Image (cartoon, rainbow, N blue to C red):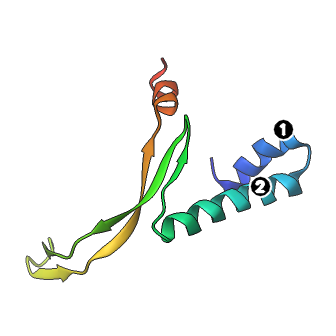
């Protein structure tokens, strides 16, 4: 399911495609900006989003075998909640 399909699915419940698109955009933007600031977003039963820091490291280019330095970076991290895990597992 992509974003457009998600908006279509939500618009069936809300009755308006415009309202559904605004709701999806607002939720995604809020999660992204909050996590980018370093705060955690936890949605009970669904999961939590947070910022994870990766330290700098040395890696190897598999094509050439040459070592390269990979700089430190921050990445988004998602951990599924218990209800979500159970639903996917079919419990």
User: Looking at the picture, how far across and down is residue 11, in whole percent?
Assistant: 84, 45
Residue at 79 percent across and 57 percent down: it is: 21
Structural distance between the alpha carbons of marks 2 and 1: 12 Å
Q: Residue furthest front?
A: 39
Q: Which residue is mark 2?
A: 23
User: Looking at the picture, how far across and down is residue 53, in whole percent?
Assistant: 31, 67
User: Total of numbered circles in the picture?
Assistant: 2
Which label sits on residue 13?
A: 1
Q: Residues within 10 Å of mark 1 (few under 14, many from 20)?
A: few
From the viewer's perspective, tell me whether residue 28 is left or right of residue 73: right
Q: Earlier in the sequence, mark 2 or mark 1?
A: 1
Q: Nearer the viewer, residue 26 or 42?
A: 42
Q: Nearer the viewer, residue 18 or 77?
A: 77
User: Looking at the picture, how far across and down is residue 55, in whole percent?
Assistant: 22, 72
From the viewer's perspective, tell me whether residue 30 is left or right of residue 68: right
From the viewer's perspective, tell me whether residue 46 is left or right of residue 75: right
Label 2–label 1 contact, CB within 8 A: no
Residue at 59 percent across and 60 percent down: it is: 31
Q: Secondary structure at mark 2?
A: helix
User: Looking at the picture, how far across and down is residue 5, in whole percent?
Assistant: 71, 49
Which label sits on residue 82?
A: none
| Image-quadrant location for residue 54 | bottom left
């Amino acid at each position: 399911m992509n974003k457009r399909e998600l908006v279509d699915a939500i618009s069936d419940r809300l009755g308006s495609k415009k309202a559904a698109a605004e709701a999806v955009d607002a939720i995604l933007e809020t999660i992204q900006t909050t996590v980018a600031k370093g705060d955690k977003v936890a949605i009970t039963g669904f999961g939590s989003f947070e910022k994870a820091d990766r330290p700098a490291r040395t890696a190897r280019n598999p094509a050439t075998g040459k070592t390269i330095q990979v700089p430190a970076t921050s990445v988004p991290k998602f951990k599924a909640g218990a209800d979500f895990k159970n639903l996917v597992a079919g419990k």
